[in-house]
Image (cartoon, grey):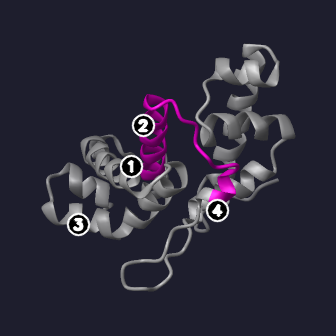
Amino acid sequence: MAQAILKRIASGDRTAVQDCLDNYGGLVWSLARKMLPNSEDAEDAVQEIFIEIWKNAVRFEETKSSETTFIAMIARRRLIDRIRKFTRQPGTDSLDKIVYEPTGKDGKEVFASIEAERAAKAMNELKPVQQKVLNLAIVQGHSHSEIAGIMDIPLGSVKTHARRGLMLVRKALEPKDLNTKEVSA
């Protein structure tokens, strides 16, 4: 199996930077265009995001998430920071609407991230209150305190719903190892 692109970047492999751009440029651009008001802001954000990805490549752990998830989380955080800086709110309504990538440079359609699609499905299976809390936090970028105010529920309840919801989504995203010989009872 080939070494992860982020591990190659962390080890100083210069060819990995271009591989990262080729493999994840569509995803990052799609997120930036969905969350920012115009192409100029999106272009600036994409550059900042890739710099952030390269700086944080050494923090990537294959046992905790996929590269796609790691990159999408960095992009989302950076975009939310950018939006907050300019006192804007992201314009997306649900996770389902931001997981699809745009058409690639060569005209072929770029497929949606498998991990993001699985996460969206897992989110849809949560209790409605957990879905709302995670949507407000992850998609719209609100803090737990802001969510408590929006939903008119205690801060501790917001944190509990967020934690339990994320635990369920994480469990749904765990890799299914088909080679294990364990038998579930």
Front label number (2 vs 4): 2
Q: Secondary structure at mark 1?
A: helix
Distance of label 2 from label 4 (alpha carbons): 25 Å
How would you classify the magenta stretch by its main secondary structure? helix
Can you see residue 142? yes
Residue 167 visible in image: no
Q: Residues within 10 Å of mark 2 (few under 14, many from 20)?
A: some
Which sits earlier in the primary sequence, circle 4 or circle 3? 3
Q: Which residue is mark 4?
A: 117
Q: Which mark is residue 18?
A: 3
Question: Is 57 in the magenta?
Answer: no
Q: Which residues are magenta?
A: 70-97
Q: Is residue 113 above or below residue 7?
A: below
Q: Amino acid at mark 1?
A: Asp
Between marks 2 and 1, how big is the CA–CA gap? 9 Å
Q: Amino acid at mark 3?
A: Gln
Location of residue 28 with respect to 18 vertically, above or below: above
The residue under label 2 is: 82
Of pointers 2 and 3, the one earlier in the residue sequence: 3
Label 3 environment density (alpha carbons within 10 Å; few <14, some 14–19, many ≥20)? few
Instruction: Using the image, tell me which numbered label, if any, was put on residue 41.
Output: 1
